[in-house]
Amino acid sequence: MAKSIRSKWKRKCRAIKRERYREKELLRLKKTLENESNSKVTKIDNIKQQVNVVTAQQIRDSGSLEDNLVDMEEVKKQFNPKTLRDKHGAYPIWVHPRKIKSSKKKNKKKGKKK
């Protein structure tokens, strides 16, 4: 593919833009590094205050993990395999909208025949 005048011009403009933004980016980088060096000390101090050290023995004494977990009941959604609807009339999330549309159409036809 040949190099067009337009692509050469665009490349030239991008190079000029890079030069212009390089200065701004350098200033921004220096400023962030200055801020970061000051803030590292305060961050470490804050982290030390927030951390609670717990030994393995304390965890074993407090009880097993299973006791701490809340028993959750699994609720299975029941749906009619013929109509693909649940008890509230909604379709499962895994049913494609196209399939929903065609099943609605079929049910509508069956209703008219009776």
Image (cartoon, helix red, strand yellow):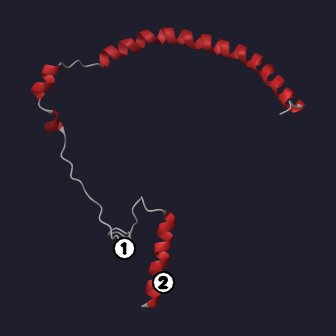
Element under disc 1? loop
Count the marks: how many? 2
**How far across and how far down the image is residue 33, in percent?**
56, 11
Position of residue 34 relative to residue 81, above or below, is: above
> Mark number for residue 16?
none
Furthest residue to the right?
5
Residue at figure coordinates x 90%, y 30% from the top left: 5
Left/right of residue 23 with respect to residue 63 in the rendered view: right
Left/right of residue 71 with respect to residue 81 in the rendered view: left
Sooner in the amino-acid sequence: mark 2 or mark 1: 1
Q: Amino acid at mark 2?
A: Lys
Q: Disc 1 marks which residue?
A: 82
Residue 1 picture quarter:
top right
Residue at figure coordinates x 32%, y 67% from the top left: 79
**How far across and how far down the image is residue 11, in percent?**
81, 25
Q: Disc 2 marks which residue?
A: 109
Furthest residue to the bottom?
114
Residue at figure coordinates x 36%, y 73% from the top left: 82
Q: What separation in Å lies between label 2 and label 1 (alpha carbons)?
A: 15 Å
Element under disc 2? helix
**How far across and how far down the image is residue 95, in percent?**
43, 62
Furthest residue to the front?
1
Q: Amino acid at mark 1?
A: Lys
Residue 40 picture quarter:
top left
Left/right of residue 88 with respect to residue 8 in the rendered view: left
Residue at figure coordinates x 48%, y 84% from the top left: 109
